[in-house]
Amino acid sequence: MSGTKQYTLIKIPLKELIQHNFDVSISRDEEIHKEYLVTQGASLLFDQIERLRRRELFHINELILVTAKKNPKQENDLRHILNEGFIYNGVHYNRFGKSASQGKDGITAFVCDDIFEELYMITQMDIEINECIISKYEAQRCLTFSSCTLIKDYMPEIVIVGEYEKVLKNQLIKYVVEREKEFTDKETGKKRKYKSREIEEGYKDLKLSPFDGCGCHEREFMEIVSAQSGLDYNAIGAQIRLPFIKGYSVYVPFREILKEWGCEYITDIYGTKHDINKIDCIWNISMFKGHRLFTEKYGDNAWREYMNTVRKYKFKLGITKYSHHTKNINKYTRMNFQYLQCLDLWNQKYIDFYENKEIENYNILDDENNGKIVNLAKYTTSLFEKIIKGDKFYTYKFMGLTDTGNHAPESRYLEAALVNDIMLKDPAVRHFIYGKLKKSIDEAKTGKIYCSGFYHTGVGDMIGYLQYAAGLEVKGCLGERELYSGNFECKDIISFRSPLVDPSEVNKIKIARNRITDRWFGHFKEQDVVMFNMYDISAPQQGGADFDGDIFLLCDEPIVIDAKIDKKIILDIEDKLTVKPKPYTKENIVEYEVLTRDNRIGEITNAATSIENRYTSDEAVRKLYSDYSSLLRVFQG
């Protein structure tokens, strides 16, 4: 982010602490040499540390990150530091917490004793916890860890509304059932029972939260956030960070819309009426993660007391990301193997040759035998060919030349070539281009080929959102199987979301426009925000997505659209079921920490790759592969 303050801090592996018996003394030179000194952007947590120490510094001594990925051999040592902490350069540090993303990387934050108690209570917003779902609460308490742009001298007037839910009747889906089965042990001859997970297909009533994680704001909010983020345009979307608040807010001229509907006031979920002329943001309880905590303690005064605590600790509004203008976005995006393997890109001519060895004179390099994947890759290979042939324009672009003139050249090689293009023939420059080109060609072989389209951040139907907030009938402005984006023609499009495991997650859907979108959402044009409808399961279909900042690749490439595989959507119908609350004790926190040290997303997607890329004409085996892929999608969720 433009203008974001940068800090240094220590990130040290557990093995280093073990080697020094949890009492480490290390010089700054050693920290640099061992690459323990890392850089991180500003955050709400760092801002609180600065406030507590009453001075501004660019190195955070008070907090240390410890990396300890899942390793049974180190489990006892991990438990030791989680219970007892460790000493670093004469200062004792105790386990403080970890964000959701840190948990996936096996990282935990430790804070020095001097500020530990006070800082912990600040992140708890003065509410001590006796019992909770520890994984969920820890992720919410540690939202302050996120790097973000801190907006100074501005806190918007926020209204919190409830979360709208609806039921979609009789949706034909695939889902997982668990059955008890029996087998005979070959060694003992005894019958044994086991539980088998199997895929079934049928009609289910599905609960949908069409605005899960998103809200809206007025123009002043957009202008202030954009200006303080150093942007030369008004970003319509912003991902929000405040204590116990996470979500994506998008600009909607709601004062004008609500007045036209005859609404002068909005009543929040706590029963308080608000004049719409004084409201800057309408957010909901799916954004306000602390709703239950504050309501349990303060009742209908929950939001008032929350804001009093925000002011008490002088918290600033944090923006972790914002929408981008299309002038800064490439209109073609590189695909990946996950996306491609979930499409029907088999070459039927090659399959016919493979299955019938009697076919003669088959030449896979003959253009007449090109399959869909070869034709899809031609845009990419033509770029490589232009560079190889010495086309200066494409060579400069490949070396990193941007369309906007306010960016410095990416490398000294490009800078030299721009001064005098004879430098393109210099051996060092040619070697640089060759290395970069070879890497790109190798990556293209593994699916990184360009397709028309780019990533968008998803939000719900904002007309429906305002109708719910105003207490009106909730209809929205988009119909079933429709999206709204100002960047594509009204036609079918493909929406991808990572990580992608199963072909049913590839969403073929229509870009729609109408009188309402044209009037109220023209500002979506030329920014990477897409609006989903509230009448289908497009978001749950795509890896259980919500709208707190999830991104979707919208692709209008005809070959990709035609390659969509028609497979029933697989959903985890127990996705929102969760574990029971436990006492919030050190013992239970340590158990949570030990169990959440790794990320199996890569393992699951690799397993999916081994299945999706196998060709068979045997229908029984095809069904088996399809069911395996569906199971992996549920495991991924």
Image (tube, grey):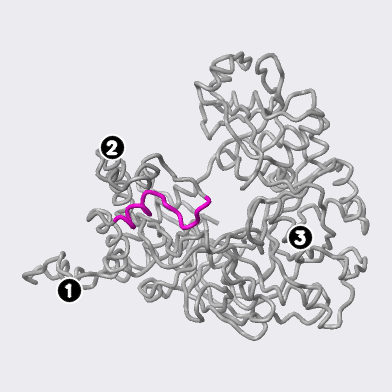
User: In terms of sequence position, does the residue under pointer 1 or pointer 3 come before the other?
Assistant: 3
- What is the CA distance from the residue labelled 2 to the residue labelled 3? 49 Å
Q: Amino acid at mark 2?
A: Ala
Q: Residue 138 location, x and y as percent?
A: 71, 43
Q: Residue 107 location, x and y as percent?
A: 59, 35
Q: Identify the residue shown where x is 27% and y is 62%.
A: 382
Instruction: Please tell me the numbered disc located at residue 221.
Output: 3
Circle 2 crowding by C-alpha within 10 Å: few under 14, some 14–19, many from 20: few
Nearer the observer, disc 1 or disc 3? 3
Whether the magenta-drawn stretch holds residue 404 is answered as yes
Instruction: Please tell me the numbered disc located at residue 368.
Output: 1
Nearer the observer, disc 2 or disc 3? 2
44 left or right of 347 in image: right
Quadrant position of the C terminus in the picture:
bottom right
Q: Amino acid at mark 3?
A: Phe
Circle 1 crowding by C-alpha within 10 Å: few under 14, some 14–19, many from 20: few
User: In terms of sequence position, does the residue under pointer 1 or pointer 2 come before the other?
Assistant: 1
13 left or right of 126 in image: left
Q: Secondary structure at mark 2?
A: helix
Q: Identify the residue shown where x is 75% and y is 56%.
A: 224
Nearer the observer, disc 1 or disc 2? 2
**Quarter of the view holding residue 597:** top right
Q: Residue 627 location, x and y as percent?
A: 42, 64
332 above or below 561? above
Residues drawn in magenta: 392-406
Res. 499 in view: yes
Q: In this figure, which residue is indicated by the disc labeled 2? A: 428
User: In terms of sequence position, does the residue under pointer 2 or pointer 3 come before the other?
Assistant: 3
Q: Residue 127 location, x and y as percent?
A: 86, 43
**Residue sitting at the far bottom:** 515
